[in-house]
Image (tube, rainbow, N blue to C red):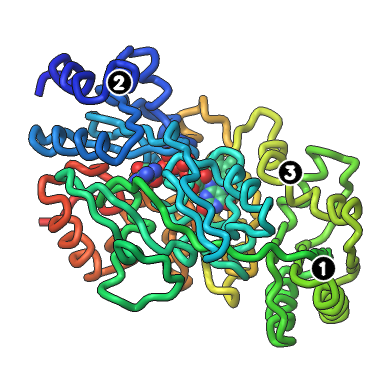
Amino acid sequence: MDRTLLIQELEKKLGQEKVISDKVDLMYYSYDSSFHARLNRFMPDVVVTPRSTEEVSEVMKLAYTHNIPVTPRGAGTGETCGSVAIQGGIVMDLSPWDTIEEVDVANMQVFVRPGVIHAKLNQRLAENGMFFPPDPGSSLMCTIGGMVANNASGLRAVKYGCTEQYILGLEVVLPNGEIIITGGMQSRAVKSVSGLNLTKLFVGSEGILGVITQIRLRVWPKPKGRGIVMAVYPSLDDAPASVLEVYKAGILPSGIEILDQSAIQAVNMYRAEINLPNAEAILLFEVDGNPASVEWEGLKIKEIASQRATQVEWATDPKRMADLWEGRSVVATAAARVRPDGSRVFAGEDISVPLSKVAETLREIRALGKKHHIKVVNYGHIGDGNVHTAPVIDPEQPQEVEAAQRLVDDIHRLAVRLGGTTTGEHGVGAVRAMYAELEHGAAVKIMRSIKQTLDPKGIMNPGKVFGPEEE
Ligand SMILES: Cc1cc2nc3c(=O)[nH]c(=O)nc-3n(C[C@H](O)[C@H](O)[C@H](O)COP(=O)(O)OP(=O)(O)OC[C@H]3O[C@@H](n4cnc5c(N)ncnc54)[C@H](O)[C@@H]3O)c2cc1C
């Protein structure tokens, strides 16, 4: 269908105010937070901002009839080019559709539209002493729709898991415009084993199977107490060993973060007053729960960590906790400081490996950085093996960009070789689609057949999650 005609048809269905076609306005939708989008421009033909399930369905029917690609988009904070229309067509911006439809306190669940911002939902839930535990670093920006589509998580996933564990049901508009509800049409049950679990199928499907228009979320009581242990290690191997010893003592912290030597150096260069001790690794254990158990667990972790660490501190005072946590909270920004003319590249940034391989992974990444002549800063959620790697380069230098791409490819392959995954939380999008077969083997065939069943014309977010089918 001709672009002008497409715009006219969309305006007829949605009204002019929900259709964006000005070339300058479309620029905003040509990128997300990925390095890939920084290197390439992917302009959509048109953007729509529907505010009802029926409007989403009308757009999908039009697109389906005329074979037009549709890319759902939340806040565009994704790191993988997932919300970018790499084959053109329609970008469907769900971020303005941000209604919290119902907080069902009696049944510990909420109904939200896809554009609700994560932090705003938690602010609202806090009024009732509840919270939605997954906690991405992008909490102030990202949408619940984007979190569901990416199965997002954060530094508390070690205890609270990923978004999928909280999704009770979804309303989804399929590529042909049909509307379905998963998890039971009328259900408010928080436990159900009825039918095939279609909710799980759509969670983490990155917009390639349909558009999520409503989410039924389970929420939890908000813990009253919190404390932090900081432990400083002279050897990298001592850090995962300490984590395992804490688990063996029967303690599951709400967060276990690592800064390796490169991250410690970056933080101190960024803000000298933080003054982290020079060491091979620093761990931060966060515990939460009722104040009495928090105190017991914190002191126990301190005792365990002291067997290997040269310096250990336990704090529950809010000011002291904030001071201990500061190095971790600035590290993503601090990374670029290891090189005065450098920028941090968001690529290869969230592999996840088994706990027993974390030290080896960090050493190998250090060696890969040397091989490709690139400084890499490492930190992450050691509790679940999710390592954040931050290569720092001058992106204006083509040879450095190429070297970074080779480095990132090596990092992804390293993760798979060590029994991990190319992505622990940010998803596949366009940038990791080429590793689908390497990581999943024959299972990719089944994934493709599910996609084919739901989206026979291949119009939903094409070019994402799997690479082109091999002949
Ligand atoms: C500073 C920063 C920190 C981050 N920290 C974390 C972190 O700790 N943990 C983590 O998991 N991620 C993190 N991210 C990545 C990103 O924020 C998350 O993946 C987030 O969930 C994406 O939400 P979004 O609204 O921006 O979605 P978008 O980026 O707009 O979209 C992401 C994907 O979801 C699809 N999608 C969006 N909405 C819908 C919908 N309604 N229906 C169907 N498909 C849809 C898109 O097509 C795309 O494939 C971070 C990003 C930044 C910039």
Q: Is residue 350 visible?
A: no
Task: Find residue 330 and name its label.
Answer: 3
Q: Is residue 447 visible?
A: yes
Is label 1 in a helix, a strand or a loop? Answer: loop
Mark 1 lies on residue: 234
Is label 2 in a helix, a strand or a loop? Answer: strand
Alpha-carbon neighbours of circle 3 within 10 Å: few (<14), some, or many (≥20)? some
Indicate the amino acid at tag 1: Pro
Indicate the amino acid at tag 2: Val
Left or right: residue 188 versus residue 140 is left
Alpha-carbon neighbours of circle 2 within 10 Å: few (<14), some, or many (≥20)? many
Give me the C-alpha separation between circle 3 and circle 1: 22 Å
Q: Is residue 164 above or below residue 122?
A: below
Which quadrant holds the C terminus?
A: bottom left
Q: Is residue 54 above or below residue 351?
A: above
Mark 2 lies on residue: 19
Left or right: residue 94 versus residue 366 is left
Left or right: residue 286 versus residue 423 is right
